[in-house]
Amino acid sequence: MSAVSRFRVPRPRTAAGKVAGVVGAAVGVAAAGLAAGVATERALVRRLKADPADPYAGEDFGAQRYDEAYRLELPDGTDIHVEVVEPTRPVPGHPTVVLVHGFCLDMGTFHFQRQLLAERGDYRVVAYDQPGHGRSGRLESGEYDLAALGHTLRRVIDRTAPEGPLVLVGHSMGGMTIMAFAEAYPEFFGDRVVGTVLMATSGGLLAETKLVAPALLGRVGSPVLFMMSTTTRYGGLVIDRARKSTSNVAWLLTRRYGFGTPKPSPALVSYVERMNSRTSADTVTRYLRTLATHSRFPALAALSGTPVLVVVGDKDMITPVVHSDEIVRRLPHAEYLKIRDSGHVVMLEHADEVNAALERFLEAL
């Protein structure tokens, strides 16, 4: 018996079950549609998790100090969870660092970067959960839109840092959000925004990405996106239950598609998978169209007069290196860091290297 047939997931019988199977398999770190050969046996997951040398086994992920946390209400009624960390050793002229996370994640993505900045104590930090993610509210109706996410970033800035210099740090969809912000508010760059960090993100080239699910986006296109979005409005709870019942598959997909090291920290994998699993299937599908149509290379021109740091893992399977290559081709002044043996969650998997680069970048401003 082949490995594939041994671990084949039973085919759902109902229409809602079929969609649940598709979405449940597709949702990994940022979803990936190649679950056919992934083993689901609990024994395999237990063995992979049982690593006595795991350096992060005792890490209290998600626990971060903050000085202010509040809800920011958007015009459509969606409320955004925001946290602000004030510097303990403020330095005049230092920018406020704004952290913008990616798809199916939350502000906890920047766990180690917040630790670094808190230990330094000389930078003010703003972090928030994107709509439909983490502790932020969901959109009541319609689809999510990257342009709207750019406007949300503007509202966060207006509320938390209405004056003074800014450094924007975006991972994956967070980087796309910064591009949408630059498209709408190019005048901010050079005046307010004095530096930008783009991690594992894309300005377009969506045919090359696995950000959502290549089988759905690259091959079948918008009709299926519409079907998926419509179906989950009625079957979202069914799909969420299916995802929970296949948590071992989700963990293995997260390990495979989110990380690049041969044996990533099981605690890190579990942490990313928990963030991912908290994002509802309804939210996932309502982001599909805006991610599939993202193309903002012209918006990068707004960044051409300010320092830029581009970071990518050389084994990123979700937004491959070609995406960062294209960003740097259009921003040749950017510092470019490719991190060996790293996947999509580069700032977690190789936190020391990313933190060192971030420190150098901030100190050079």
Image (cartoon, rainbow, N blue to C red):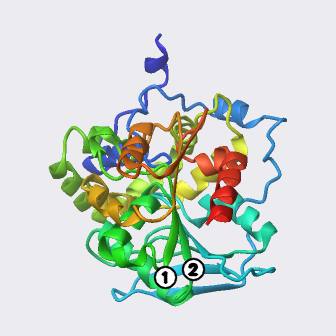
- Amino acid at circle 2: Val
Query: 88 and 213: which one is in front?
Result: 88
Q: Which residue is mark 1?
A: 156
Q: Position of residue 183 (x, y in %)?
A: 31, 69
Residue positioned 27% across, 41% down in the render? 207
Query: 194 and 81: which one is in front?
Result: 194
List the single residue furthest toward the top.
1
Query: 23 and 239: which one is in front?
Result: 23
Q: Position of residue 274 (x, y in %)?
A: 60, 55
Say whether residue 363 is left or right of residue 22. right
Q: Position of residue 296 (x, y in %)?
A: 29, 59
Residue positioned 35% across, 42% down in the render? 209
- Amino acid at circle 1: Val
Q: Which residue is mark 2?
A: 82
- Name the secondary structure under disc 2: strand
Say whether residue 261 is left or right of residue 66. left
Q: Residues within 10 Å of mark 1 (few under 14, many from 20)?
A: many
- Name the secondary structure under disc 1: helix
Q: Residues within 10 Å of mark 2 (few under 14, many from 20)?
A: many
Say whether residue 332 is left or right of residue 106. left
Tell me which label, 1 or 2, sits earlier in the chain: 2
Image quarter where the C terminus lies is: bottom right
Q: Is residue 102 visible?
A: yes
